[in-house]
Image (cartoon, rainbow, N blue to C red):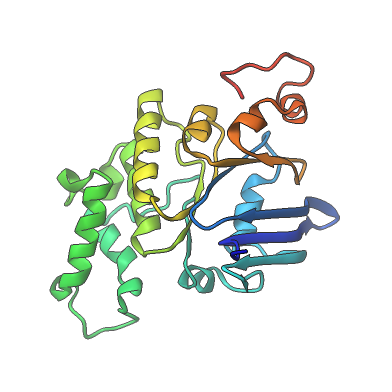
């Protein structure tokens, strides 16, 4: 049996006396697309912060391709092949689209902290950045400062930055938040394209996005995974319906 790309075993997180994550067990297989859903305050973003090293776990283990990462710094986890985006767009607003992407590819191409390399002379970095830029549909915005992009374009750029370094495990935190329906549909197409053959873990509230992308869905309520299965099974799960809708009948548009 192959080792999961990402695995959480009895992961817990306390802030003071308050336990936010309560014994989460979750495995994401290589090449799988798994969505985490749940009510506001369920602990979804906290899980992302634990996985990416932004927060330390109170107990439990997180492994990436079989290697424990729960005590590593975020940059160390990134260098092992995991990259993430954030709920709030995280880009260099004064740099151009191309410059943002070029920054993202440097480390993966072997360029470390160096004062003797002229960026404009790095042909491989330029070619890789331009390839990613084309894949996210922003070639026509190449020299535009990122801060002047539309919101949807900034989100696309952040997704491009997330995948540009070549990470095999991608975490996307609410990638379509704040988008219109047409923008969300375009984002789904983009995410499907740029994460092809990669492992994807995402937090998302838009159920049309979730059902359009996910192979499996994990439902988190009060810091616990109450269900994890295929979209069709999750849609019919009574515990999930109750967590979202109380005693109301299930609404296909919501779940």
Identify the residue at the far front of this view.
Answer: 1
Q: Is residue 183 above or below residue 225?
A: above
Residue 219 visible in the shown view: no
Look at 34% across and 60% down and name the residue there: 164
Q: Position of residue 21 (x, y in %)?
A: 76, 52
Look at 35% across and 73% down and name the residue there: 107
Q: Is residue 115 above or below residue 239?
A: below
Q: In the rendered image, which quarter is residue 197 located in?
A: bottom left
Q: In the rendered image, which quarter is residue 52 located in?
A: bottom right
Q: Position of residue 45 (x, y in %)?
A: 62, 48
Identify the residue at the far right of this view.
Answer: 17
Quarter containing the C terminus? top right
Q: Position of residue 188 (x, y in %)?
A: 40, 36
How many numbered badges does the structure rendering display? Answer: 0
Residue 23 visible in the shown view: yes
Q: Is residue 148 left or right of residue 199?
A: left
Q: Position of residue 79 (x, y in %)?
A: 46, 72
Q: Is residue 19 left or right of residue 201?
A: right
Look at 63% across and 67% down and name the residue there: 63
Quarter containing the N terminus? bottom right
Residue situated in front as seen by the camera: 240 or 75: 240
Q: In the rendered image, which quarter is residue 181 located in?
A: top left
Identify the residue at the far bottom of this view.
Answer: 116
Residue situated in front as seen by the camera: 236 or 134: 236
Q: Is residue 176 left or right of residue 146?
A: right
């Amino acid at each position: 049996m192959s080792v999961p790309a990402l695995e959480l075993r009895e992961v817990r997180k306390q802030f003071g006396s308050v336990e936010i994550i309560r014994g989460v067990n979750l495995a994401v297989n290589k090449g799988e697309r798994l969505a985490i859903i749940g009510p506001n305050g369920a602990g979804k973003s906290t899980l992302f912060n634990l996985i990416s090293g932004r927060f330390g776990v109170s107990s439990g283990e997180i492994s990436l391709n079989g290697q424990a990462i729960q005590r590593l710094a975020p940059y160390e986890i990134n260098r092992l092949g995991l990259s993430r985006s954030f709920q709030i767009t995280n880009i260099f607003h004064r740099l151009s689209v191309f410059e943002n992407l070029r920054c993202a590819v440097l480390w993966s191409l072997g360029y470390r902290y160096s004062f003797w390399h002229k960026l404009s002379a790095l042909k491989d970095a330029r070619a890789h950045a331009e390839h990613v830029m084309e894949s996210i549909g922003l070639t026509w915005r190449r020299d535009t400062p990122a801060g002047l992009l539309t919101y949807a374009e900034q989100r696309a750029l952040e997704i491009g930055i997330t995948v540009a370094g070549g990470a095999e495990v991608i975490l996307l935190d609410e990638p379509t938040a704040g988008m219109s329906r047409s923008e969300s549909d375009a984002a789904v197409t983009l995410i499907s394209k740029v994460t092809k053959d990669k492992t994807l873990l995402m937090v998302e509230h838009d159920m049309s996005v979730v059902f359009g992308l996910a192979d499996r869905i994990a439902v988190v309520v009060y810091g616990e995974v109450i269900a994890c299965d295929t979209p069709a099974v999750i849609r019919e799960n009574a515990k999930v319906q109750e967590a979202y809708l109380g005693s109301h009948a299930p609404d296909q548009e919501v779940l």
